[in-house]
């Protein structure tokens, strides 16, 4: 007879293709709150840099006030950011939650979705700021007007938002919402139900 841990791992692997497919094709709808939050933050906090935030699927285009080069006219710099790069934790969290087969899994899915979205917004904004403050052409970087310490902070926010948060936050949220399930995995003999009540 398979152990509960083996069954859980197998179920997670079976759910992953479905959750990733749903995430990919429904991304414009799932990530619409991120687009709204990013637009509001950009207009409020860095409105002198951002004229508009446009969307195409899961990609946000930041239309800036910056010129392509010093003294040039006839266009402004725009930056594309793919939100999927910072949102892959959503299908991972969903697969883990569905595999745990908890009685309250749909509520847990909505809770996790709500908790993860701000971190997707973090990564998206940090990516944009990294582009205009660090990796753009020198003429564009100088127009952006960020000081040295601000560029260091942006670089940290980008690294943290792209390398750490997308993978770690879903795992932490899942552990916090499935403590009973994890206890049952540790003591399978004490399990009396099918899944977590998280």
Image (spheres, rainbow, N blue to C red):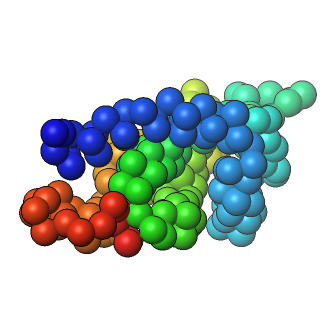
Q: Nearer the viewer, residue 197 or 160?
A: 197
Locate residue 8, reporting x and y percent: 29, 45
Horizontally, residue 176 falls left or right of residue 30, namely left
In the image as oriented, which residue stretches furthest toward the front? 1
Q: Picture quarter containing residue 110?
A: bottom right
User: What residue is shown at x 67% (from left), y 50% (from top)?
Assistant: 31
Horizontally, residue 64 falls left or right of residue 126, namely right
Task: Answer yes or no: is residue 100 visible.
Answer: yes
Q: Picture quarter containing residue 1?
A: top left
Locate residue 86, reporting x and y percent: 50, 43
Q: Is residue 17 above or below residue 8?
A: above
Q: Is residue 115 above or below residue 56?
A: below
Locate residue 167, reporting x and y percent: 35, 45
Q: Nearer the viewer, residue 113 or 189?
A: 189
- Of the 4 image quadrants, the one containing the C terminus is bottom left
User: What residue is shown at x 41% (from left), y 63% (from top)?
Assistant: 102
Task: Answer yes or no: is residue 173 visible.
Answer: no
Horizontally, residue 180 falls left or right of residue 63, namely left
User: What residue is shown at x 55% (from left), y 34% (from top)?
Assistant: 18
Locate residue 46, reporting x and y percent: 67, 61
Q: Nearer the viewer, residue 10 or 168?
A: 10
User: What residue is shown at x 60% (from left), y 32% (from top)?
Assistant: 21
- Badge count: 0
Horizontally, residue 158 falls left or right of residue 110, namely left
């Amino acid at each position: 007879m398979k152990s509960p841990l083996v069954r859980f791992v197998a179920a997670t692997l079976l759910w992953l293709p479905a959750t990733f497919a749903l995430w990919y094709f429904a991304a414009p709808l799932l990530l619409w709150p991120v687009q709204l939050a990013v637009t509001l933050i950009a207009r409020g906090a860095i409105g002198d840099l951002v004229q508009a935030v446009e969307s195409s699927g899961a990609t946000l285009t930041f239309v800036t006030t910056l010129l392509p080069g010093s003294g040039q006219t006839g266009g402004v710099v725009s930056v594309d950011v793919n939100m999927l790069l910072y949102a892959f934790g959503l299908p991972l969290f969903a697969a883990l939650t569905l595999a745990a087969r908890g009685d309250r899994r749909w509520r847990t899915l909505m809770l996790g979705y709500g908790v993860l979205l701000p971190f997707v917004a973090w990564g998206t904004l940090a990516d944009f700021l990294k582009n205009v403050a660090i990796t753009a052409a020198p003429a564009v970087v100088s127009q952006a007007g960020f000081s040295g310490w601000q560029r260091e902070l942006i670089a940290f926010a980008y690294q943290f938002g792209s390398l750490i948060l997308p993978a770690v936050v879903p795992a932490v949220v899942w552990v916090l919402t499935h403590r009973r399930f994890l206890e049952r995995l540790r003591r399978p003999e004490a399990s009396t139900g099918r899944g977590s009540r998280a």
